Amino acid sequence: MNKLKSFIGNLSTSITTADDSSSSSNQIRHRLCKVNELENGQMKEFEVKTPVVEATVLLLKQNNRYYALSSRCTHCKLPLVKGVFANGRLRCFAYGSCYKAETGDLEDHPGHGSLQKYNIDIVDDQVILVARKQDLEKVECTKIPEDLQCDTKATVLIVGAGAGGFTCGDTLRQNGFRGRIILFTREGSLPYDRVELSKQPLKSPKELLLRDQPYFRKAKLELNLDTEVKSISFHSKTVTYQTLGKQLKSEQYDYLVLATGLRPRQLSKNINGQELRGIHVLRSLEDANNIVNKVKQEQTKNIVIIGQSFIGLELCGWLTTGLPNFEHKNNNNKLSAEEQKSEQKKNVTVIMRESVPMKKIFGEKVGRALQHIHEKNGARFISSAEIQDFTGESNMVTHVHLTTGESVACDMAIVAIGSEPCTEIYKNSPIEMTDDNYIRVNDRLETSVENVMAVGDITEYPLKIFNYDQGIRCQHWQMACSEGHHAADTILHKLGYNSSNPNPHNERALKQEFYTVPIYWTTQNKNTIIRYCGYTTDADNCIIHGDLDGEFKWVAYYLVDGYVRACAQSQLDPLSSEVAEVFYQKRNIRKEDIEHDMYGYRKYLNIKINSK
Ligand SMILES: Cc1cc2nc3c(=O)[nH]c(=O)nc-3n(C[C@H](O)[C@H](O)[C@H](O)COP(=O)(O)OP(=O)(O)OC[C@H]3O[C@@H](n4cnc5c(N)ncnc54)[C@H](O)[C@@H]3O)c2cc1C
Ligand code: FES
């Protein structure tokens, strides 16, 4: 552990003397350090305290040049100094957002929005920050001009406004597309952070928004809420959609992006009692709201979760450890101590087909450890069991009956048994699909139909970092955003923009091919977070270092043919971001490298140890 600490050396320096900074009403000049204080490849965080503004700034040194950026990741505003700075890229330690050091531009997600970039003056041997007050006050910048002028020369229609669809539209605009961008979503909300629904279902819709209404107006992103696309004519390039008022309308496109995501898988139709009230699924904000309302009810005591993957177990964690005191009031409008105690407690049972939860994703050992954590927090697990049927009273579910013969009392059931693609509108079309209805795309996110791209959970795509050209599915937030980003760049390439014909509205480099490292995470409760990078289908072929049963501080390396192809870790930040960076650089980590040394991958990573 000490080795890790010295390696990262989270640096934070405060320079506050009057001599250090000077400021006009708007322009700040602030001494940060001496020119030789950082080595190439190092970064350091500085607090900038002046009479007119207080901020933190991240200083990076590369090829003997200094760069100053805003210091917090645009995703969850965590300190970037804890991340990885390698080959001119800065990767956040937490969920892997990447930024270009020279410009602060967002290179990979889950964040949206770039870092603020500030100027540096070198005077004698001093590094001086030069920045406007208002820029120091902002954490992020978006590349949308205040007076954005659009034309109607090209129209991009985007079906779906989730992670993939929104990111595509937003990146198009930020990367200089000036035609019309029209998004359709069946949901009634602006695009939001779906991943939080199973972790913090009580968050208000406003807290979850990726961008607010004024942003959509400013960026001229035409968002059609409560609008369902019913059919697409790929021949006449027309999308037909139904509005909330049930009107059928149509719109023509030059470029089309399909981003319709998944829906929860239903239980087999043979299972009786599924029409009873109190049986829920979770995909949307509306679903989360329904779950919260049901959980809040005093009579909801026995909650059954059917399924043992991400959504099921995250909800289990929230129900056992994350419930606040809901405001149930007696006649005096006050909660008695007795009421408070009893209403907090829910009996949570997880019913799973498999013997160990999340075995397919993290392997048996990690899965068992997770089960123990949930059991310690009061959840009960029933393994190797299938649902026979539901029974109820007054149209409300009261019991779930299992094929093992057991019956479980159940005031509420949450069915979390996986998902299936929302791709029926592309069936019987020229779009090439897999046998189980996913869309095949190439390394530019193009489908088999010209000028039609597909992104997000509905796609099967080549994974270039490991040369998996046969196509994989990795249905996670960062991948969906990253695909949306690349599809936007593909459209700009199609419009003829390239290095010899740069887009006049865009200073950023366009991506050539879909090249990213899959990153995902799960928050099983607020103290149990697993971060993952890479891709494997054989989670039990792994080497684990650390403690799974006590403090839950560990790393698992997943192997394919003797090479590390994925890694999961808990409480060892920024380990998975470092490994992601090795994958990104296409260096092979061998089994021997990490077998006896959990940091054995570092020899492939050209990063500097920060010093005090
Ligand atoms: C509860 C939950 C928790 C999750 N937690 C994590 C996590 O911790 N980490 C992680 O990496 N990933 C997580 N995920 C997965 C992640 O949210 C998805 O991978 C991501 O949202 C996929 O983005 P997408 O754009 O493909 O689809 P979505 O975000 O689902 O968006 C699909 C969009 O298509 C629209 N749509 C569908 N059909 C039509 C139609 N016919 N007409 C108009 N609009 C249509 C929908 O309204 C929606 O706007 C979680 C998912 C859920 C549901
Ligand atoms: S806080 Fe950096 S990726 Fe989320």
Image (spheres, rainbow, N blue to C red):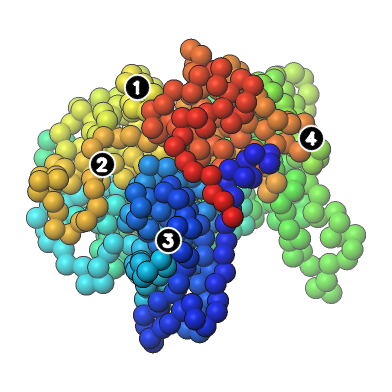
Query: Does residue 443 sit above or below 558 in this rendering?
Result: below
Quarter of the rendering containing residue 474: top left
The residue under label 1 is: 467
Which three-letter amino acid code belongs to the residue tagged 4?
Gly
CA gap between label 2 and label 3 equals 34 Å
Q: Which residue is mark 2?
A: 511
> What whole-number distance in Å separates the C-alpha atoms at marks 2 and 4?
44 Å
- Answer with left or right where residue 498 lies relative to residue 26: left
Q: Is mark 1 within 8 Å of ligand 1?
A: no
* Residue that carries the numbered disc 4 in the rendered image: 550
- Front residue of 408 and 465: 465
Secondary-structure class at tag 2: loop
Mark 3 — residue?
A: 35
Q: Position of residue 275 (x, y in %)?
A: 59, 37
Label 1, label 4: how many angstroms apart (C-alpha)?
38 Å
CB atoms at circles 2 and 3 under 8 Å apart? no
